């Protein structure tokens, strides 16, 4: 038997045409052509060149497939892949499987689109830009321009946000289902019954392989009295219809800081309480110091290194009793946001019935191929807890879907994944931090460039920023770049390729940037390893 890759087929009729062309060749005993896989199997005493010529004469392309398992043949009578979870990771897995020719069932018991679209990335970034626009008159750095701040109608703002989400939900998910007829979607709670069988709303379905992408939800810590208090997580506060007078935020990482600054700029008093020694504690100290200074300058109250002892409510007021530096204090406000991390949605989905193990925190155990402890089941996204980013979830989902059907070939590489906190200024980073590099025993060097050395930042009067570059001392290889500045989430993409492909400081210095730009800060930082950039003319090496 020979296997051929067929190109140019757009429908089942094309497959029939190609099959007839192959069967017309002398010596062909049997031929099967599979659409949409773009694949053909031919048996008999045959001449490969004659087969290829016959296919080409029919108007298509053909080439020999030498490597096994690079196409998937649908089982036909069962679902080739069941995806439990209809967010970014789940749809990435489903699309990849469908492209391979599989029949897919996607199961979702909440709103289609997952956390990022409905309760995370998209709504918060929309509100961040709304808040930025509203706050501009207060932050205008330019003389000669007088701006007046008007009123804010929070109810209308939230309604506009919801309209955006409705549009994106249709564009990015419902329209995708229409474009992929081999993907079936069911709303309801899915639960594994046994290997090869999953139950949805009481009905059982058989499958060949499965991918679990059930995501995560806000973690609510066991604080004394919290169960009797009206509090919000990111789910509820993104649909608020009034402006809090005083918002207390428990948690000083990305979610708490982004939402806290949104309402600070809308006009609320905001207090952030963080148990760790600093906010955004996983970021480089130079970056988080710039951010903290900026937030406190805007009026945010930040208390770090605290311990929450108790929370109670008196009427509409919420009080948080904390211990800080050995002293007991009570912070009282009108509204309370709990932003203390996330936990996986892995309970009550039948993992124990199919031998899928979780770690002590409930996250599903996976290997580098995204395969669980059950070889027929893979997992991706927040429920595996590797890096809780929508970009990572989608990449993991695609890899999981492909490996489930074709065998373990692709691995997930986390070494050059960028991340960002979308406050103003933003924090973004890629690669190793200084501490991580030292933990690995790498002999490093690093430089920190302040944005008052960046011409574009000077022109914009937005110089409260830094870029930090960590390099291997002996080779100059760039190991990590971390930024806190205006538009850091965009600048960081220049850094990704430097880290991913192991470029050096010298490589960066020899590049030519557009001038003046904020991304030029990376080159300027690289130059500081050998020169004082304050004594260089514009664009000089």
Image (cartoon, rainbow, N blue to C red):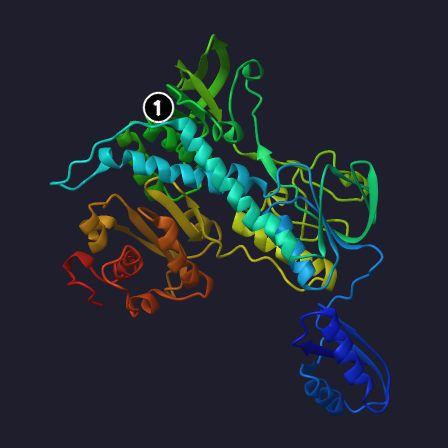
Q: Residue at x 66, y 41 (%)?
A: 214
Mark 1 is surrounded, within 10 Å at the Cα level, by few (under 14), some (14 to 19) or many (20 or more) other residues, namely: some
Outermost residue to the right: 29
- Residue 7 lies, in percent from the top left, at 66, 77
Vertical position of residue 165 compared to residue 329: above or below? below
Left or right: 253 with respect to 220?
left
The picture quadrant where one finds residue 56 is bottom right
Vertical position of residue 360 compared to residue 25: above or below? above
Q: Residue at x 47, y 7 (%)?
A: 314
Left or right: 46 with respect to 537?
right
Q: Residue at x 26, y 62 (%)?
A: 527
Outermost residue to the top: 314
- Residue 170 lies, in percent from the top left, at 57, 46
The picture quadrant where one finds residue 79 is bottom right
- Residue 427 lies, in percent from the top left, at 37, 44
User: Which quadrant is the C terminus positioned in?
Assistant: bottom left
Vertical position of residue 224 compared to residue 181: above or below? above
Query: Quick check: can you spot residue 68?
Result: no
User: Which quadrant is the N terminus positioned in?
Assistant: bottom right
Q: Looking at the image, how many numbered discs can be counted on the residues? A: 1
Left or right: 79 with respect to 282?
right
Outermost residue to the front: 13
Q: Secondary structure at mark 1?
A: loop
Q: Nearer the viewer, residue 307 or 241?
A: 241
Residue named by callout 1? 268
- Residue 488 lies, in percent from the top left, at 35, 49
Q: Nearer the viewer, residue 365 or 117?
A: 117
Vertical position of residue 518 compared to residue 476: above or below? above
Query: Quick check: can you spot residue 464?
Result: yes
């Amino acid at each position: 038997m020979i296997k051929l890759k067929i190109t140019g087929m757009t429908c089942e009729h094309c497959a029939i045409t190609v099959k007839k062309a192959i069967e017309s060749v002398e010596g062909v005993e049997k031929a099967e052509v599979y659409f949409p896989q773009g694949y053909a199997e031919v048996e008999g005493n045959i001449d490969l060149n004659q087969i290829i010529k016959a296919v080409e004469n029919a108007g298509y392309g053909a080439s020999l497939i030498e490597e096994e398992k690079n196409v998937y043949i649908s089982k036909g009578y069962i679902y080739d892949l069941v995806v439990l979870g209809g967010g970014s990771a789940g749809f990435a897995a489903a699309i990849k499987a469908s492209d391979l020719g599989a029949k897919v069932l996607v199961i979702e018991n909440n709103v289609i689109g997952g956390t990022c679209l409905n309760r995370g990335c998209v709504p918060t970034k929309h509100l961040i830009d709304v808040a930025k626009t509203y706050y501009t008159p207060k932050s205008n750095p330019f003389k000669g321009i007088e701006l007046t701040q008007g009123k804010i109608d929070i109810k209308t703002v939230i309604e506009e946000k919801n309209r955006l989400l409705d549009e994106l939900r249709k564009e990015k998910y419902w329209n995708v289902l229409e474009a992929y007829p081999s993907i079936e979607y069911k709303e309801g709670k899915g639960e594994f019954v046994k290997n090869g069988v999953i139950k949805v709303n009481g009905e059982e379905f058989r499958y060949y392989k499965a991918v679990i992408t059930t995501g995560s939800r806000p973690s609510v810590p066991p604080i004394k009295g919290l169960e009797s208090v009206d509090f919000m997580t990111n789910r509820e506060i993104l649909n608020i219809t009034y402006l809090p007078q005083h918002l207390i935020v428990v948690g000083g990482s990305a979610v708490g800081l982004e939402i806290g600054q949104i309402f600070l700029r809308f006009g609320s008093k905001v207090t952030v309480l963080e148990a760790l020694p600093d906010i955004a504690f996983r970021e480089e100290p130079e970056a988080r110091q710039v951010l903290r200074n900026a937030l406190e300058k805007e009026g945010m109250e930040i208390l770090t290194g605290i311990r929450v002892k108790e929370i109670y409510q008196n009427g509409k007021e919420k009080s948080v009793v904390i211990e800080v530096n050995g002293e007991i204090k009570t912070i009282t406000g009108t509204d309370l946001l709990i932003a203390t991390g996330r936990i996986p949605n892995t309970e009550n989905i039948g993992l124990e019935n199919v031998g899928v193990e979780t770690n002590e925190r409930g996250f599903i155990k996976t290997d580098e191929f995204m395969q669980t402890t059950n070889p027929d089941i893979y997992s991706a996204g927040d429920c595996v807890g590797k890096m809780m980013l929508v970009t990572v979830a989608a990449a993991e989902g695609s890899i999981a879907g492909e490996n489930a059907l074709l065998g373990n070939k692709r691995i997930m590489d986390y070494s050059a994944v960028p991340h960002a906190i979308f406050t103003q200024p933003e924090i973004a980073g890629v690669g190793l931090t200084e501490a991580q590099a030292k933990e690995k025993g790498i002999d490093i060097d690093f430089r920190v460039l302040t944005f008052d050395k960046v011409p574009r930042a000077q022109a914009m009067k937005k110089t409260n920023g830094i870029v930090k570059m960590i390099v291997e001392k002996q080779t100059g290889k760039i190991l990590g770049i971390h930024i806190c500045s205006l538009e850091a989430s965009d600048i960081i993409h220049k850094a990704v390729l430097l880290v991913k492909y192991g470029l050096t400081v010298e490589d960066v210095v020899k590049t030519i940037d557009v001038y003046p730009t904020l991304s030029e800060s990376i080159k300027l930082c690289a130059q500081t390893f050998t020169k004082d950039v304050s004594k260089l003319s514009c664009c000089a090496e």
